[in-house]
Amino acid sequence: MKMKGLLLFLSCVLCVSADVLHEDSYISGCSDSDGEDMYGLDGEEVWYADFNKQTGVEPLPDFADPIDFPGHYESAVANLQVCRSNLKTRRDAMKDIPLEHDAPSAVMIYTRDEVEFGEKNTLICHVTGFYPAPVNVSWTKNQQKVTGSSINVPYPNKDGTFTQISRLQFIPQQGDIYSCAVEHLALTKPETRLYDVKASGQSDPGVGPAAFCGVGLTVGLLGVAAGTFFLIKGNECS
Ligand SMILES: *[C@@H]1O[C@H](CO)[C@@H](O)[C@H](O)[C@H]1NC(C)=O
């Protein structure tokens, strides 16, 4: 009976998670100067149109199975034209309705990998909760502008706002300070986040985790030994 209860509980958890197992999304949008056409899956970009390079981009990592998107770039261009003409019509029709502006609700800066001095890493500036898209993100290193960062296309959130992620490759060196500055229509001055390599660096990464692992393993083995002892003892008694 108990077993049946457990099974029912488990299958219930499974069916709940099956409801939201994967989330497919598609967005097509435009402004006078900008446009976006993107297929997303579970919060990741699967395909987007790069209108500057005039091609489709599949930013999935190498381990994923490639998916073909034949003719998608051409459709994206057609969608963009339709969008611009719709935009013009609606702007004329709704000229008295003010556009909604939401400044980013959160800007976060962090590294992709654990910091080790001298080891290649990526700084990430994660901007979310803004409307309309896009934001501009610029980077500095020790207060000097740096170039070479990349930014992904705006990803739609459930509440109608957007998320954008800017990345900067860097090599952590003690004493370096990085910043990302976010510009958005609804901000009067850029929103800036600092990243201080000194505060997050780890000069000796080996010892801490290894020590924790050792202690954890010892405690675990002691537990198993104690459990076995009492199990045998209990069996002897009965
Ligand atoms: C982003 O930068 C471009 C080019 O410098 C500028 O035209 C645009 O107004 C900026 N956008 C925002 C939201 O600041």
Image (cartoon, helix red, strand yellow):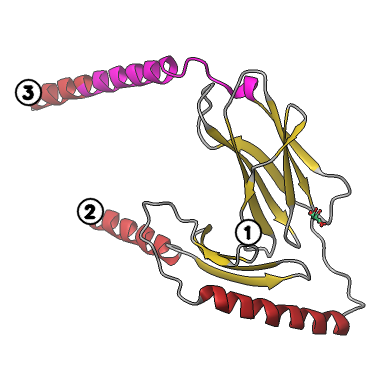
Identity, as a three-letter code, of the amino acid under mark 2:
Met
Please identify the quadrant where the C terminus is shown. top left
Q: Name the residue under label 3.
A: 236
- x and y, in percent, of residue 206 in the image: 41, 17
Residue segment shown in magenta: 197-224
- Judging depth in this view, the residue of 216 and 28 nearest the camera is 28
Identity, as a three-letter code, of the amino acid under mark 1:
Val
- Judging depth in this view, the residue of 140 and 202 nearest the camera is 140
**Residue 65 as seen in the image, left or right of residue 43:** left
**Residue 11 as seen in the image, left or right of residue 69:** left
Looking at the image, which residue is at 68% across and 71% down?
Answer: 29
Ligand 1 placement by image quarter: bottom right
- Judging depth in this view, the residue of 74 and 222 nearest the camera is 74
Number of the label disc, if any, that sits on residue 3: 2
Number of the label disc, if any, that sits on residue 109: none
Looking at the image, which residue is at 68% across and 52% down?
Answer: 128
- Residue 95: quarter of image: bottom right
- x and y, in percent, of residue 105 in the image: 74, 50
**Local secondary structure at mark 2:** helix
Name above or below for residue 174 compared with residue 66.
Answer: above
Mark 3 near mark 1, Cβ–Cβ under 8 Å? no
Mark 2 near mark 1, Cβ–Cβ under 8 Å? no
